[in-house]
Amino acid sequence: MDQWGVWLLIIVILTILEAMSASLTTVWFVISGIIALIISFFTDNYIIQFGIFVIVGVVLLATTRPILLKTLKHHKEATNLDRIIGMEAIVTEKITKNQPGEVKVEGKRWSAYADETIKVGATVKILEINGVKLKVETVEGE
């Protein structure tokens, strides 16, 4: 098999691996394999071809993969519960730093915790949802 045939085989194998994993790792070596395939028509030196394959693949992997992953990153879908983040709630059971309490928001009672002690009747802001508990903080002016 000629050197171009070896590169074509490598390209096909790496393409199949990328299609099976979709991890954006071997795709860069598919590209560098194509470049090495093109180089094989100009030089018979396999060391040069392999060197170009490795160098181009590693450079592409290191420079473009993080950018592409950031671009393709799936954004978390907001659920109906996520809409209460940022809302205000009323404390119905005292919350301490070490003991969760309870808040009421939109007519529903939730377990809640905070980094501070918050008395019953205080207005709090919902910061986040962790499982079935809300993280809250006192609203300024309370």
Image (tube, grey):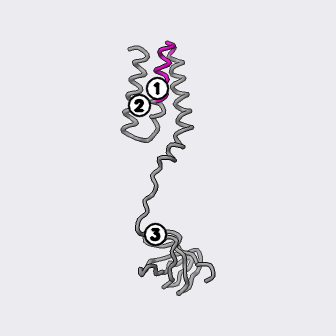
Q: Secondary structure at mark 1?
A: helix
The amino acid type found where label 1 is placed reads Gly
Q: Residue at x 39, y 40 (%)?
A: 21
For label 2, the residue is 14
Q: Residue at x 43, y 41 (%)?
A: 23
What span is colored magenta in the figure? 31-45
- x, y (%) of residue 43? 51, 13
Q: Secondary structure at mark 2?
A: helix
- x, y (%) of residue 6? 41, 20
Q: Find the distance from the CA under tag 1 to the CA under tag 2.
A: 9 Å
57 up-or-down from 141: above or below: above
Instruction: Tell me the tag on residue 83.
Output: 3
Query: Which quadrant does the C terminus fall into?
Result: bottom right
The amino acid type found where label 2 is placed reads Leu
For label 1, the residue is 33
| Magenta residues, dominant SS class | helix
Q: Secondary structure at mark 3?
A: helix
47 up-or-down from 119: above or below: above
Instruction: Tell me the tag on residue 139.
Output: none
The mark that comes first in sequence, 3 or 1, is 1
Residues at discs 1 and 2 in contact (Cβ within 8 Å): yes
Query: Of 103 and 96, which appears nearest the observer?
Result: 103
